[in-house]
Amino acid sequence: MEKLKPKLFSVMKTYTKQQFVKDVVAGIIVAIIALPLSIALALASGVGPEQGIYTAIIAGFLISFFGGSRVQIAGPTAAFATIVAGIVAQKGMNGLIIATILAGIILIVMGFLRLGNLIKYIPFTITTGFTAGIAVTIVIGQIKDFLGLAYPEGTVTIETMEKVDAAIKNITTINWQALIIGSICLAILIIWPYINKTIPGSLIAVIVGILIVKLLNLNVNTIGDLYEISNKLPQIQMPEISFGVVQEMLPDAFTIAILAAIESLLSCVVADSMINSKHRSNMELIAQGIGNIGAALFGGIPATGAIARTAANIKNGGRTPIAGMVHAVTLVLILVVLMPYAALIPMPCIAAILFMVAYNMCGWRTFVNLCKSSPKSDIIVLVTTFVLTVVFDLVAAIEVGILLAAILFMKRMSDVMEVEGWKYVDDEEDPDSITLREVPPHTLVYEISGPMFFAAADKILNISVKDDTQFLILRMRSVSAIDATAMHSLEQLYEKYSNKNIQMILSHVNEQPKAVMDKAGFTKVVGVENFCTHIDEALELARKRCKEAKIK
């Protein structure tokens, strides 16, 4: 059973001075990346800029200290921006603090109940759909600042559709100077990574935006024009708690908890693949709960694992939770010394940064590919989740998406299920028996039975090989159906072993799985010649290639 022990306590047994230096460097670099992002995401969430920094400091430190991942970097993320903005607008900061604390408690309970693995029961189409939907809502929410629009007093812009309506009605108030600044900053964010990958483009965009607005004295709103800037250290803020308020905020708390769990564990999975490690999912949920409670009590907003910042940590040498803790301490120093200068940052620059955040998180290529290659039922779930996230909210999107996925999945299973009479024969008489067959050298055969769908997709990735394996045969005669999530896992399996020069051969792929593979382009990637109609043909193909390669 998975340990409920922070990774920090495990990695410190073999910690070295050399790794400490690498962790410190990585932590400082990630803090520089997190600074403009934390401010931008705080503003998108309807709170003050310093509250984004508070979140990155408190939650970032606690989640690194208690977390189940070696390299996870936590803080405010784009996934929460729309949800938090809605809570703040309707329930105020007191409501947000209570909702975040409750979400933290829910996450801790989930961790102790060892529910970390239950996240796999949320289909890939749903996570893709609501992630893309959140990205669109972020873009819509930043149109006002990017274009410098002026709304009449009393204009209500809480819901996404209300923001769209207000932007259309007031499009004639566009501030061309703001648009120019926003466009310049956006161009920097797009081009800069091709020039220099060490210094974050968001920092360059902020500096350039400030200089242009100040030197040319442009009529463009800055953070200081709209918000009061504070460089004070975070202080404990106890909310006003009552049974009625707790009851009212519980649905929002569940939304925050589920989203935090999904985002953090997805980030852990990505990080594991980058450093060849394995996170402790249940301990990570407990850490996320502790981090969110801490952030809420010190005036922050909900936090979770940030995939982009985690990846940056890894690429710069971070390999232990020390890097995440250094990132938090560095942000404390930045808060005290540099925070007053944040007042000079133009709002169109913040909007441009959030445009890029939305683009990077939306996964439009994955979305389009799923629409092209997935079964119709998965496409319906994907598009429905996306539309509901944009038009209504994330709660409705996840609830309806999961319900719809379950119904369509059951229908798919009933459509492909077959019942046949038994045929009693001895093993020697069975022409399809593998027990008496000779497997070629350096070849492994795995037989997959039953439908390949989202709840069992992770089992595909558990397929392992030996050091001398050259050929991997998947016998799929008993696979009656495959969905988009399982197809995605199969593609990951192929990519994993093709990188190790291991050839994949598929035997007896049935009609529905073959149609999905053809539509997804998987057949073309693997090679039509590697699809065999019978196990004997697959074994002979492996044997022939062994001889051709003169493998002994």
Image (tube, rainbow, N blue to C red):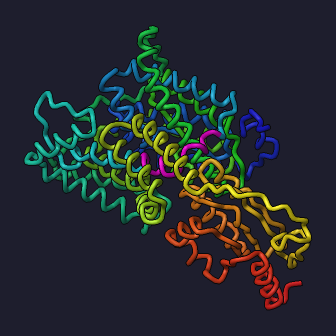
Q: What is the tally of numbered marks visible in this picture?
A: 0
Q: Position of residue 160 (x, y in %)?
A: 27, 39
Observer-nearest of 281 and 215: 281
Q: Position of residue 466 (x, y in %)?
A: 83, 67
Quadrant of res 286: top right
> Can residue 312 be seen by looking at this rendering?
no
What stretch of residues is rendered in magenta? 118-131
Observer-nearest of 48 and 96: 96
Main SS class of the magenta portion in the image = helix
- In magenta stretch: residue 219: no
Report the residue at 56% width, 71% height from top: 522
Whether residue 366 sits left or right of residue 116 in the image: it is left
> Can residue 420 be seen by looking at this rendering?
yes
Q: Position of residue 358 (x, y in %)?
A: 38, 51
Q: Dividing the image into 4 quarters, which one contains the C terminus?
A: bottom right
Q: Dividing the image into 4 quarters, which one contains the N terminus?
A: top right
Q: Position of residue 342 (x, y in %)?
A: 34, 39
Q: Residue furthest left?
A: 172
Observer-nearest of 270 and 479: 479
Position of 121 relative to 370 (above/below): above
